[in-house]
Image (cartoon, rainbow, N blue to C red):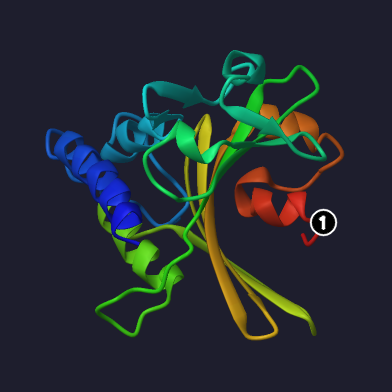
Amino acid sequence: MKNKLLFFALLLSSLIAISQNSQPLTLKNNSDYIPETTQNDTILKLFKTTQLGKTKVSLRQNIEELKEISVKDPNNFYHFKKDSYGVADSIWVEVNKSKQIIAIYFSYDYAPEYSNDTAYIHELHKYQKIISPNGKEFVYTSQTVSYKITKWEYKTVRFELIEVNKAGKKRTYSVIFDNELYFQKLNGYKGNKSETSIELLRLGLN
């Protein structure tokens, strides 16, 4: 638990340091509209790359470059060996047919120690401060499962924070998507791309 919190504290402190050199972001009308050359652009561009120990994992990178630390899973997913990074958080990626990374996933398997918040609310407040308070929200509910999602987006990168509630058991994770490559995979989708959640599309729920 302490290692997880340390990992995200370091990530957040580096992002905040960069954002302090940018002008404050003001969104106009549509909460999903993010102008170019803003604090959001800088932050979300950083999300394209994740540091695992001495190794960088980036969107569009070929997974073969990471074969020493990655393990193949079904359906074009790979997870990283626990000794490849210094914390116990689950990190995995999805690749396309060319073995390019099109999404990076992070699991938040903890309960906040000093509040009654869920992990989702705790992380949501954190990213609202780092990126913008105006993420776009999505909710999906069925008889067996519900999803709560907040997304932030820059042209090429989308960040989605997700809470899954199944039989009262909640799980929180986030995904960094490469917009172009992921919608190439979802080439049958004809709707408004900016008005949907990629994760719900991936799961066939949208």
Q: Specify whether 122 is left or right of 172.
A: left
Type of the residue with mark 1: Gly
The residue positioned farthest toward the front in the image shown: 83
* Residue 6: percent from left, percent from top: 26, 51
Question: Viewer-proximal residue, 156 or 37?
Answer: 156
Q: Residue at x 76, y 29 (%)?
A: 184
Q: Is residue 105 visible?
A: yes
Relative height, residue 38 to residue 62 (above, below): below
In the rendered image, the vertical position of residue 184 relative to residue 27, given as above or below = above
Give the residue drawn at x 36%, y 31%: 46
Please give the name of the residue rendered at 40% of the width and 42% of the height, measured from the top-left corner: 34
Percent across and percent down for residue 146 are 68, 76
Is disc 1 surrounded by few (<14), some (14 to 19) or many (20+) residues within 10 Å?
A: few
x and y, in percent, of residue 33 in the image: 44, 46
Q: Quadrant of residue 19?
A: top left
The structure residue drawn at horizontal position 47% and vertical position 32%, both measured from the top left corner, is 84
Which element type, helix, strand or loop, lies under badge 1? loop
Name the quarter where the C terminus is drawn. bottom right
Residue 149 pos. (x, y %): 56, 63
* Residue 19 placement, left or right of 80: left
Report which residue position mark 1 lands on.
Answer: 204
Give the position of the N terminus as an image quadrant.
bottom left
Viewer-proximal residue, 130 or 8?
Answer: 8
